[in-house]
Amino acid sequence: MKAHRILFVGPAGAGTRTAIAALSEAPVCPTDGKPGAPGGMDLGVLTLAGGATVQLLGAPGQGGFDVAWSALARDALGLVILVDNTRPAPLSDLGLYLEGFWDELPGLPCVIGVGRTLECSAPSLDEYAACLEEHALVLPVVKADVRQREDVLLLLDLLLVQLEAMERQGGVEART
């Protein structure tokens, strides 16, 4: 049985820790130095309406962790990719994560949260959708201010809808 875990990833500054803190019922704990835990991760916890407890795990955004990303994604119920629109090449950032999780994406609910769109309106959500299309993927792409609990809850809702649809189709029995 897989852990009830949702993985948050994104480049440095995209807000993975902030997103987890917006939802977590306990203070976000960095896993650095904890026995059996990968370093550089952030961990939070959330209880869903049905009473299930979900771990919120933030993975490091720096390069060189893509092997760990794959292992973490195999144990996750869903993946939230956060992108910072003020970075020099946010579409390239997204492409890096799509390629890093390529093997897992066909069976893993995933949503793209685009932050800091008020500070920088380009690229547009349509351009992000086109980037996904170039990778032969159709995933939800939404604006998200990760400081706002409601915005991060929307990301989780989109994941849970995908998870439910996959379960109905019989595609994710091993994940639950």
Image: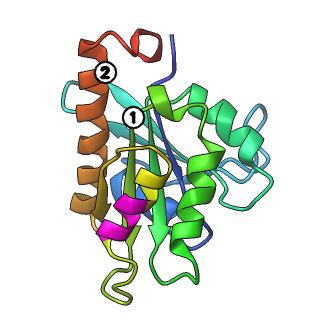
- Quadrant in the rendering for residue 160: top left
Q: Is the magenta stretch mostly helix, strand or loop?
A: helix
123 or 58, nearer to the observer: 123
Residue 79, position as x, y percentages in the image: 46, 42
Question: Is residue 59 found left or right of 79 in the rendered image?
Answer: right
* Segment colored magenta: 125-130
Number of other residues with Cα within 10 Å of mark 2, as a class: few under 14, some 14 to 19, many 20 or more: some
The foreground one among 175 and 150 is 175
Q: Can I make out residue 37 in this image?
A: yes
Residue under the point 23% across and 52% down: 154
Residue underneath mark 2: 166
Q: Which amino acid does label 1 sit on?
A: Pro
Residue 57, image x, y percentages: 54, 44
Residue 129 colored in magenta in the image: yes
Based on the picture, tell me whether residue 139 belongs to the magenta stretch: no
Helix, strand or loop at mark 2: helix
Say whether residue 42 is visible: no
Left-right relation of 85 to 129: right
Q: Residue at x 51, y 22 (%)?
A: 3
Residue that label 1 marks? 109
Q: In this view, does 98 lie above or below 55?
A: below
Contact between labelled residues 1 and 2, with CB atoms less than 8 Å apart: yes
Question: Residue drawn 30% across and 50% down?
Answer: 140
